[in-house]
Image (cartoon, rainbow, N blue to C red):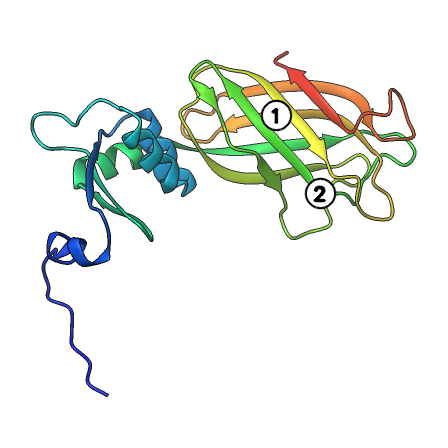
Amino acid sequence: MTTTQAPPHDNWSDVSAALGERVALVHPGNAELIHAVQTGTLHQAASLAQNGVPPAAADGSGVTVRAFWWGFHFEIDHPSLEVAHNAADTVNSLVGTGDVDGAGTDANVCITVLGSNGISDEIQLDSGRDDFERNSVDTFTHTLRDLGDLYRIRVRHDNSGSRPGWFLDRITIRDEDSDKECTFPCARWLAVDEDDRRIDRNLDLA
């Protein structure tokens, strides 16, 4: 069998006629792109580009999105990638489980962070350890795009495991770059057999 090495240059234009309709789309290095780069949801960037996102800056910075029948090809320039990287904040979520009988949970716990600049994707909190035990504080590190001033956290679990009921005391978000902390009190059950039987809560900033 004979194989041919691909040329070292961009040959998308050459092959597009044979492989499908080529649509050249340009996406600027804006908040939507930053979010797509950070979360890996690049199809979201393509969709935004297709639906009329303003063109890139005159200096050519931004992302070129080429759409083919099998998917999308992205070209991200250095300035845009740097913008995306610099806009990411390393944060710690400190989750405090209450000190009441049966407070701990075996369920999978997820949070969504809401701020003045947008909403994060849902984040599963899993350190690989035995998290969410009674009277404990568990720390989870993740990267968030700049959400502005945080004002709410949505927290839920999937009611799985042998002891899914959970008494959540509070969640604190700490920005490791600025040392700023935001605390969201709860002090309620997330359980189908306790309190109001809900396994999701909206926690507002204290």
* Residue 191: x %, y % from top left: 84, 31
Out of 183 and 108, give the one closest to the viewer: 108
Which residue type does callout 2 highlight? Asn
Quarter of the image holding residue 37? top left
On the image, numbered disc 2 is attached to which residue? 108
Instruction: Give the residue drawn at x 62%, y 19%.
Output: 183
Out of 50 and 43, give the one closest to the viewer: 50
Quarter of the figure with the C terminus: top right
Say what secondary structure mark 2 lies in. loop
Quarter of the image holding residue 34? top left
* Residue 157: x %, y % from top left: 73, 36
Instruction: Give the residue drawn at x 31%, y 32%.
Output: 33
Q: Is residue 67 left or right of residue 201?
A: left
Instruction: Give the residue drawn at x 45%, y 20%.
Output: 118
On the image, numbered disc 1 is attached to which residue? 172
Q: Is residue 84 left or right of residue 112?
A: left
